[in-house]
Amino acid sequence: MQELEFPAPLLLTLDRPAVSNFPIYLFIFIVFLNRYVFGLYLALFKGKKFDEKIEGYEPTVTVVVPLYNEGRSIYDTIVSLTKLHYPKEKLNITVVDDCSTDDSYQWACKAASEHPNVRVLRNPFNMGKRKGINHAVRESTSEIIVSVDSDVIIFPTALRELVARFTAPDIAAVGGRVHVSNPNDNWLSKLQTIKYYFGQEHLKNLERSLKSVMCLSGCLTAYRRHVLIQLEPILENRNILGVPIKYGEDRFLTRQIVKHGYRTVMTMDAMCFTKAPTDLRGYFNQQLRWKRSNVVDFALGIGHAWKLHPLLCIQYLSMFMLLLVYPFVIINHILEGEFLDLAMFHIAVIAAFSLIYWFAPTTRKLPPWLRVHPIAFLPMAVLMPVAYLLLTPLGMFTLDTSSWETRGHVAGAPRSLMDASARNRNVKNEH
């Protein structure tokens, strides 16, 4: 899944001469316009065309679930997929086990023995998420491939909502909305619930309006199979200086789809639920994966960024600059004794975002168990600078990692994701 960035106003420097601050203010203004004003304007301007759909389209579909060390939760995920509202004769589910070292494979086989349209494949050796998905794609004959992470529960109507967005032949991928299934576990899961909200409800408006969403989450995305087959050689041979890498597959794949002239869209009506990390170790491991992905794909994508729509090009380049410059801005404030001023400004900005979240119509339509109190977002004023200061350099110096870097879910997790599935029945009516 992509990193959920926040606006460049956090780069603001305080108590400096106005002239020296002018480039920073200009940068802030451009990014703010691009990320919020232009995206919101285009969304309102397009109206119903912002999220176009067609009725009656029922292609054959294979849902692919790459698996590595998820334990019992993979059984829950598979069972939720068998309950999707879609013709059974047109739906297949393929689980690809990447040589798990726990009992994941046994749980997947148990689900397959109970449901005839479920198939379990096992890689001959640990190959990584993308090669596992490619393995399943080659084995499939379906028109549409839906990628689902192994720790995800999908809302029953999500598949229909995804395929309904393939309104034109050049639309190659459609992504869905990711909800946090454990929003009220603790302060960290509450914080991430609000973070996910902004990452999907606001920061992607520009990309959605221009039908060039630059990162579709592996939690829930549908692809045209023939496009995946076309891109397979590129996806199979991804490496850095000859070292195969297994992180950032979602962003890399989406970028390649856009690079090859296809369109990518996203809809909020196709919903899924994922478990957010509830401890700092898990959270920072997640952020490190995303930092590596951002650094690699932003850097490698500069060569064709100019081919994007001008607004997207500006957004792409400005977010890459933000990723690289932000750690130095923090260090500079620390060295000049102004970190407290910057921290207070961060708190003010985060507080403003908290209020936006709390009063937004889309938030208030959600059922109570999917909402959190806005004060839970305030720790982001500390976590975000720390993540940028420590994880951006660390990510840049560990780009050659070939680890699967699983999210750390184990068998017998405290909250079964089926708890979320059981409560999802009323979400659609309240969303």
Image: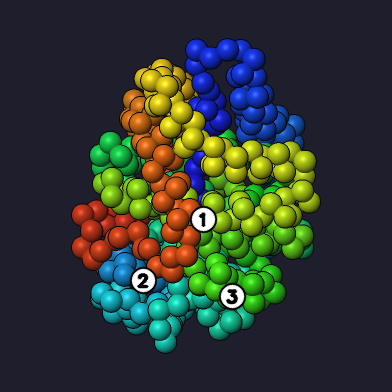
Q: Mark 3 is on which residue type?
A: Asn
Marks 2 and 1, how far apart at CA: 20 Å
Q: Is residue 403 visible?
A: yes
Number of residues whose C-alpha sits closer than 10 Å to that of mark 3, classed few (under 14), some (14–19) or many (20 or more): few
* Front in this rendered view, residue 225 or 350: 350
Say which label, 2 or 1, has the lower sequence index: 2
Quick check: marks 2 and 3 in contact, CB under 8 Å? no
Element at label 3:
loop
| Residue annotated with mark 2 | 68
Q: CA distance from mark 1 to mark 3?
A: 16 Å
Which mark identifies residue 293? 1
Does residue 33 appear left or right of residue 180 in this picture? Answer: right
Foreground pick, 35 / 385: 385
Q: How many marks?
A: 3
Q: Position of residue 313 (x, y in %)?
A: 72, 43
Residues under labels 2 and 3: Cα distance? 21 Å
Q: Residue at x 59, y 60 (%)?
A: 252
- Badge 1 density bin: few <14, some 14–19, many ≥20, Cα 10 Å: many
Mark 1, secondary structure of its residue: helix
Which amino acid type is marked by label 2?
Tyr
Circles 1 and 3 in contact, beta carbons < 8 Å? no
The numbered mark, 1 or 3, whose residue comes first in the sequence reads 3
Q: Along the polypeptide, which appears first: circle 2 or circle 3? A: 2
Disc on res. 237: 3
* Residue occupying the point 42% across, 87% down: 124
Taking the spot 67% from the left edge, 33% from the top edge, the residue there is 34
Give the camera-side residue of 254 and 83.
254
Badge 2, how many Cα within 10 Å: few under 14, some, many 20+?
many
The quadrant where residue 184 appears: top left
Q: Position of residue 147 (x, y in %)?
A: 52, 65
Amino acid type for the residue under numbered disc 1: Ser
